[in-house]
Image: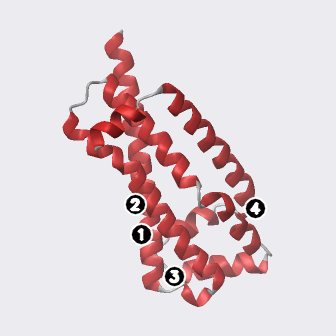
Amino acid sequence: MFAMLRDRLDAWWLILVFGLIYFVSQAIIGVIVHPLGADMLVVQTTLSADHVREIFARWAAAGLLDTYASHYRFDNVHPLWYAMFLATALAKGFNANRVPPRFNALLALPFVAAACDLTENLFHLSYLADQANITPAHVLMSNGAAIVKWVLALGCVLGAGGLAVRSKFARG
């Protein structure tokens, strides 16, 4: 299964298409959430329910909860764009560097990150629906998933970048 995925994703046009879609999507989301400032990242990564409640209260007082809610129109599909972009870049890097097939399962990591992102989104949407849902257990699950998402996505970016550099230097 992963060998077929590796072969099908190894295409410059896929990297370009999904990269472009990802960057446009990220820019749109960035514009929407810009008024939320650094709290946007904190609300995703803190493991404190009290801290999430404080941020939501600040946003409510500033009239920004609708701004936060509106980004989900794009953020609920955004994980697909970065998962495909990262998986195509990894597949290209694997093939360019003749990475042994036993590592093909690593191509699933961008999709695991995307699943974590969607898990986070579902919880955060439930917080918007009813702030009583901001419990320690829910914050641990949602933001734990977000932290895993960030670690996996960063690992994939570094892996794809490292493979690209290695391939470039190997060719001379």
Q: Which amino acid does label 4 sit on?
A: Pro
Determine which quarter of the picture holds residue 6. top left
Is 145 in front, or is 98?
A: 98
Q: Which of marks 2 and 3 is in front?
A: 2
Determine which quarter of the picture holds residue 129. bottom right
Looking at marks 2 and 4 on the same chain, the residue that comes earlier in the sequence is marked by: 4
Label 2: element kind: helix
Question: Which label number is shown at residue 35?
Answer: 4
Tell me the CA gap for discs 2 and 4: 25 Å
Tell me the CA gap for discs 2 and 1: 6 Å
Identify the residue at image location x=47%, y=68%: 119
Q: Which of marks 4 and 1 is in front?
A: 1
Is 145 in front, or is 41?
A: 145
Q: Which residue lies furthest to the bottom in this view?
A: 132
Residue 125 against residue 25 in the figure, above or below: below
Which residue is tagged 2?
Answer: 148
Rendering coords of residue 92 (x, y %): 39, 29
Question: Which label number is shown at residue 144?
Answer: 1
